Amino acid sequence: MRVLVIEDDRETAAFLQKSLKESGHTADLAEDGEGGLSMARGGGYDILIVDRMLPQLDGLTVVKTLRQEEDRTPALILSALGDVDDRVKGLRAGGDDYLTKPYAYTELLARIEALARRATPEEQATRLSVGDLMLDRLSHRVTRSGESVQLQPREFRLLEYLMKHAGQVVTRTMLLENVWDYHFDPQTNVIDVHVSRLRAKIDKNFATPLLHTVRGAGYMIRDSAG
C-alpha cells in the first residue's frame, strides 16, 4: 500500500515511515496540515494516517476538507485525545478510524490493513491482475502463472501504478509524479532503467509480453492475448 503520514513530530513520522517500509508498504511524509492536504489532493494514496494536532491546519480539518471534496481515501486519525467525545468528533469529521496515543505499531498496522480491506473495490482493490500476472497490495506478493516474482520496492510501486492503469498509456510525467514523487522531469533515464528491469522480471521466459513501450507517449501494461 501507499500511505501518506501527516505528522508534525519528526521522530514519530520517521518511525512510522521506517516501520511501514519494513512491513512492505511505502510511506510519504507531510509535517503540517496544509502540506498534507496538498499531497492528499494529489491522489494515489491507499491510506491516510493523520495526526489530530497539526500546525497550520489541524488533522480533523484536513480530513473534513477532503470529504467535502469527495475524496474517500480511508483515513486513520491519531490523537492523544482519547475521550469518547473526541473520538466521536474525529469520526464525524470523516475519519474512518481513530487510534489513541500511545499505541502499538502492530495495532496501527492491523487497523490500516483493515481499512484497506473495507474500502470499495472501485476505490481500493487490494489485488490487481492483468492476464496471468497477479499483484497483492497488502502482502506485496507478485506472481505470474503462479510463479513468484521478486521485486524491489520501487519496482513494486511502478508495477502497481501500471496495473492500476492497465490498458491505458502511462506517461513519463505520470510516473515521475506518482512513483518517484518528482513534479518535473530531471532529464535522467531512471524510468527507462526501472521499466527495463521490471520487464525482464515479469515478461522474460513468458510467451505473452505484458509491459509495452508506446513510442513517443509512455508505457502500457495489458494482456496482449486478450
Image (cartoon, grey):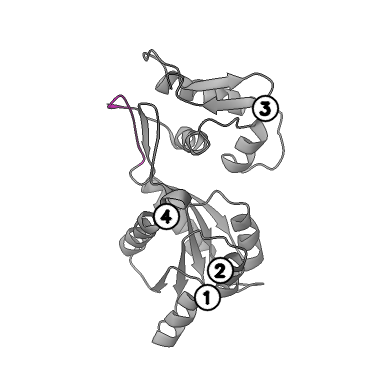
Q: Report which residue position mark 3 lands on.
A: 188
User: As rendered, which of 68 and 113 lies closer to the eye?
Assistant: 68
Of badges 3 and 1, the one in the foreground is 1
Q: Report which residue position mark 1 lands on.
A: 93
Residue 83 visible: no
| Range drawn in magenta | 140-148
SS for callout 2: helix
Sequence order check, earlier mark of 4 and 3: 4
- Residue 145: in magenta span: yes
Q: Residue at x 59, y 65 (%)?
A: 66
Q: Amino acid at mark 3?
A: Thr
Cβ–Cβ under 8 Å for marks 3 and 1: no
Q: Amino acid at mark 1?
A: Ala
For the C terminus, the quadrant is top left
Residue 172 visible: yes
Q: Report which residue position mark 4 lands on.
A: 120
* Image vertical order of residue 77 relative to residue 133, above or below: below
Distance between the alpha carbons at the discs numbered 2 and 1? 7 Å
* Image vertical order of residue 14 relative to residue 85, above or below: above
